[in-house]
Amino acid sequence: MSDEASKTAPVMKKLFIKTYGCQMNVYDSQRMAEAMGAEGYVLTENQAEADMVLLNTCHIREKAAEKLYSDLGRLKPLKLEKPDLKIGVAGCVAQAEGEEIQRRMPIVDLVVGPQAYHRLPAMARAGRGVDTEFPAEDKFEHLPKPAAATRRAPAAFLTVQEGCDKFCAFCVVPYTRGAEVSRPVSRILAEARDLVSRGVREITLLGQNVNGWHGEGPEGREWGFGRLIRAIAEIEGLDRIRYTTSHPNDMADDLIEAHRDEPKLMPYLHLPVQSGSNSILKAMNRRHTVDQYLRLVERIRKARPDIMLTSDFIVGFPGETDQDHRDTLALVREVNFGTAFSFKYSPRPGTPAYERPCIDDAVADARLQELQTLLTSQQRAAQESMVGRELGVLFEKPGRNPGQMVGKSDYLHAVFVEAPEARVGDLVRVRITYSAPNSLAGELAA
Ligand code: SAH
Ligand code: SF4
Ligand code: F3S
C-alpha cells in the first residue's frame, strides 16, 4: 500500500447489533446500523470483535425485558477485557427504564429510546449518555441514507406509523413508543421507491397500529391506509405488499376493498383478537366484541376468499374464568387461523391491569397449552392445504443443497424449490408438492 492510500483509508469500527421484539425493532436496527455506518461503523456478526455492542430491546412481557439483563451480565467480561468497547441499549426497555439501566448495569454507556435513535451517532461521539425524549423532529428525516449503490435483500420492512393511542389494559406500547404518529405520504413513497431501486421486490409496511395510518395525499385530501397501499402498488418493480400489525377497529372499508382489488397486496392478514370472551375483551379495553370481530372476518373473507388470517392471544388475563377460556377456544374453531401467537399474561408495571389480581399460574399454563394445541393443529392443516396449489414464491436465499432455492410463499411459508437457474430476488410460480413440519417444498410451474 502506498503512503497516500494508508493515510486516506478510513478506520473501520465494528458494530454488533442484537434485536429483540417485533418487526419495528428489526427496522429500527437497520436504520441505526445505517446511521452508525455514516460514522465509520460496519456491521459484524461476531460480538467478540465489536467496538460497539447495541442491544435493541423489547419490553412487552417480563421475560423479554429480563433478557436484556442476562445479556448484559454476559457482556461484562468482554467490557473488562476491552475498556473502549461501547455498550448501548436501545428500544422499548431503554424507553421504559432509562437511567435505571445504567444504575443496575454500569457497563452500559448509552441508553437511547425508540424515538431518539437518530441522535445515537452524536451520543456515541460524546461517549456516554441517556436519551429517552420524544423529540418534535421527525427522526426518519435525520437519519442518513445508505450509499445509492447499496443493494438490499428482496424483502424489506418500511415503518409508516408508530406509537399507539389504544391503551389496551395489558400493554406497554403506548408508553414505550408514545402517541400514534403517521409518516407523511411523500416520504413513505420516496422510501419505498428507494428500496425498490436497491433490489427490493416485497415491502412489509409496519406500525403498532399500521391500519390506523392516515395522512394528506398529494392532492390535499385525507388518505386512509387502503389508499396508501394503492399508491405504493403503483411503483414499478415492486411485486408484493404486506402490512402488520392491524387493530380490528381500524379495518376500514377502503382497506378491505384493497384486499379485493389489489393483486400486489398479499392474501395474508395478522389481525390480533387476544380473547374470545366479551367480558375479557372489555376488561382488556379492546373496544370491540367477539361478534364484531367475527363479522369483520366475514367481510374480509368475502372480499378476498383465499386470505389467511393470523392472530395473537393472551391467556390468563386477570379475571379469566374457565368459561372465558372456552369462549376463546370456540372463537379459534370458528375462525380457523393460519397461524397464531399465544402468550401467558405478563403483568407490566405502569399498565392499567398491573394491579389486578392474577389468576392461578398452573391454570394459566394449562390453558395456554390447550390453546396452543388447537392453534398448532390449525396451522398444520393450513400448511398441508397448500399441497397441490400453485403459489408465488419470492426467492430470498440459496438452499442447503446445490441448485436449491428458498423463498416465501404468498402466505409466508418457507418454500424449498430446485431451481438451478434462478437467482435471489426472482418471483416465480411454484406448484407445492410436500409439507414438512416447518416448511413446504415445490417445483417450478411450467
Ligand atoms: N399492536 C398489536 C400488538 C403489539 S404487542 C395489537 O394491537 O395487536 C404483540 C402481542 O403481544 C399482542 O398482540 C399481545 O398478544 C401480546 N402482549 C402484549 N402485552 C402483553 C402482556 N402484558 N402479556 C402477555 N402478552 C402480551
Ligand atoms: Fe398494545 Fe393494544 Fe396498542 Fe396493540 S393496540 S400496541 S396491544 S395498546
Ligand atoms: Fe416489544 Fe417495543 Fe415491539 S415492547 S413488541 S419492541 S414495540
Image (cartoon, grey):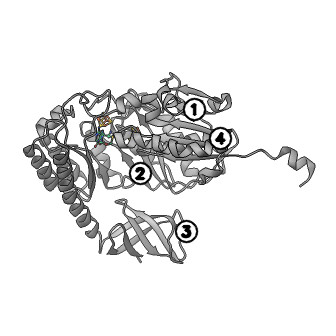
Helix, strand or loop at mark 1:
strand
- Do labels 3 and 4 touch, CB within 8 Å? no
339 vs 27, left or right, is: left
- Per the image, the residue denoted by label 4 is 85
Q: Nearer the viewer, mark 1 or mark 4?
A: 4
Q: Label 3 to label 4, Cα distance in Å?
A: 39 Å
Q: Which residue is mark 2?
A: 241
Label 1 vs 4, first from the N-terminus: 4
Q: What kind of residue is marked 2?
A: Ile
Instruction: Residue 110: give its label.
Output: 1
Tell me the mark number nearer the camera, choosing from 2 and 4.
4
Q: Is residue 431 positioned above or below 167 on the image?
A: below
Hey, what amino acid is under mark 3? Arg
Return the disc, 2 or 3, that comes first in the chain's sequence. 2
Circle 3 — which element? loop
| Dot placed on the residue nearer the N-terminal end, 2 or 1 | 1
The tag earlier along the polypeptide, 2 or 4, is 4
For marks 1 and 3 on the same chain, the one whose residue lies earlier in the sequence: 1
Which is nearer the N-term, disc 3 or disc 4? 4
Judging by the rendered image, the residue that carries numbered circle 3 is 423
**Labels 2 & 3 near each other (Cβ < 8 A):** no
Q: CA distance from mark 1 to mark 3?
A: 41 Å
Nearer the observer, 206 or 327: 327
User: Taking 378 as reference, is 136 left or right?
Assistant: right
Quadrant assignment for the N terminus: bottom right
